Image (tube, helix red, strand yellow):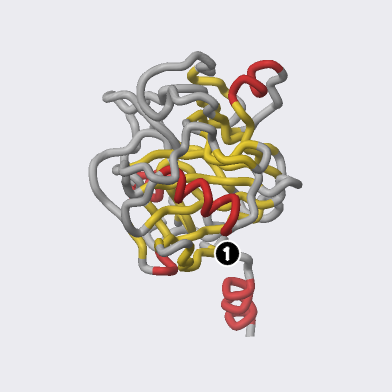
Amino acid sequence: MRWLAFLFGLWAAPVAAANCRAMTFDGADYTICTVDMQTDDLRLFLNDKDGKPYGHFAAIETALGRPLAFAMNAGMYHADRRPVGLYIEEGDQQAGIVTSAGPGNFGMLPNGVFCVQQGSARVIESRRFADDPPTCRFATQSGPMLVIDGALHPRFLPDSTSRNIRNGVGTSDDGRTATFAISRQPVTFHQFGRLFRDGLGINQALYLDGRVSRLWAPEIGRRDGGVAMGPVLGVVGSQPSAGG
């Protein structure tokens, strides 16, 4: 009967799963994915062992030998896929924080940092982060902030005509939950910010990107492909992948 016990052990072992759902808010459709920072292994990925950007979700899975239960592009990057702002991976800071205003969405201050700590995650406005840097196992900077202390970014306009597929992340006040969202059709910044603040009740939220926004959530049939990405946030499964 040992083989039965072995098979039961495989079935009963905890496996990270994408807690993703569809949501409609204010006339727009979204996919919402929730990560439990107490139990899920959320990491940042950029370069492989040879120092080359992974670029694609499947390449990360292959390198890990384990499935990604959930993954999403994790912030803006240069043409060579280097992060635009702060980037920390396994405690190693690979790019510094940028606190000055600049062109594009990243430079539309206030922008922010998504910081993963042991058992928690926080979205922190960049200048606050720079003034009193917390210890982050992983961190990525992007911009603009979507919600700051429960208020929408001051430059978001209700009547804006700038629409894109957009993705972002917000954190609960206690840091135990990170909530990711990606729109299913082009939306404005004002719509996207309101999703987090009014639809999800989140007080701190950060824009990750638009146009190149991607989601990997096999349990709901999402395996987005496309051009190579820069930083990626992903929840690592606890079981070896089929090819691992």
Looking at the picture, does residue 176 appear above or below residue 128? Answer: below
Q: Which residue lies furthest to the right in this view?
A: 174
**Residue at figure coordinates x 58%, y 31% from the top left:** 90
Residue 113 in picture, x, y percent from top left: 57, 30
Q: Considering the numbered disc 1 on the image, is that residue within a helix, a strand or a loop?
A: loop
Q: Which residue lies furthest to the top in this view?
A: 100
Q: Which residue lies furthest to the left in this view?
A: 227
Looking at the picture, does residue 5 appear above or below residue 23? Answer: below
- For the image, the number of numbered tags is 1
Looking at the picture, does residue 26 appear above or below residue 210? Answer: below
Q: In the shown orientation, is residue 194 left or right of residue 59?
A: right
**Residue at figure coordinates x 64%, y 46% from the top left:** 171
Name the kind of residue labelled 1 in the image: Val
- Residue under numbered circle 1: 15
Q: If the image is split into quadrants, where does the C terminus sit?
A: bottom left
The answer, for residue 66, to whether it is visible in the render is no
Residue 65 in picture, x, y percent from top left: 43, 51
Quadrant of residue 150 in the image?
top right
Q: Residue furthest front?
A: 159
Q: If the image is split into quadrants, where does the N terminus sit?
A: bottom right
- Give whichever of 138, 188 is nearer the camera: 188
Looking at the picture, does residue 194 appear above or below residue 127? Answer: below
Quadrant of residue 128 in the image?
top right
Residue 91 in picture, x, y percent from top left: 61, 27
The answer, for residue 194, to whether it is visible in the render is yes
- Give whichever of 77, 244 is nearer the camera: 77
**Residue at figure coordinates x 48%, y 43% from the top left:** 233
Residue 37 in picture, x, y percent from top left: 66, 50
Mark 1 Cα within 10 Å, few/some/many (few <14, many 20+)? some
- Give whichever of 93, 13 is nearer the camera: 93
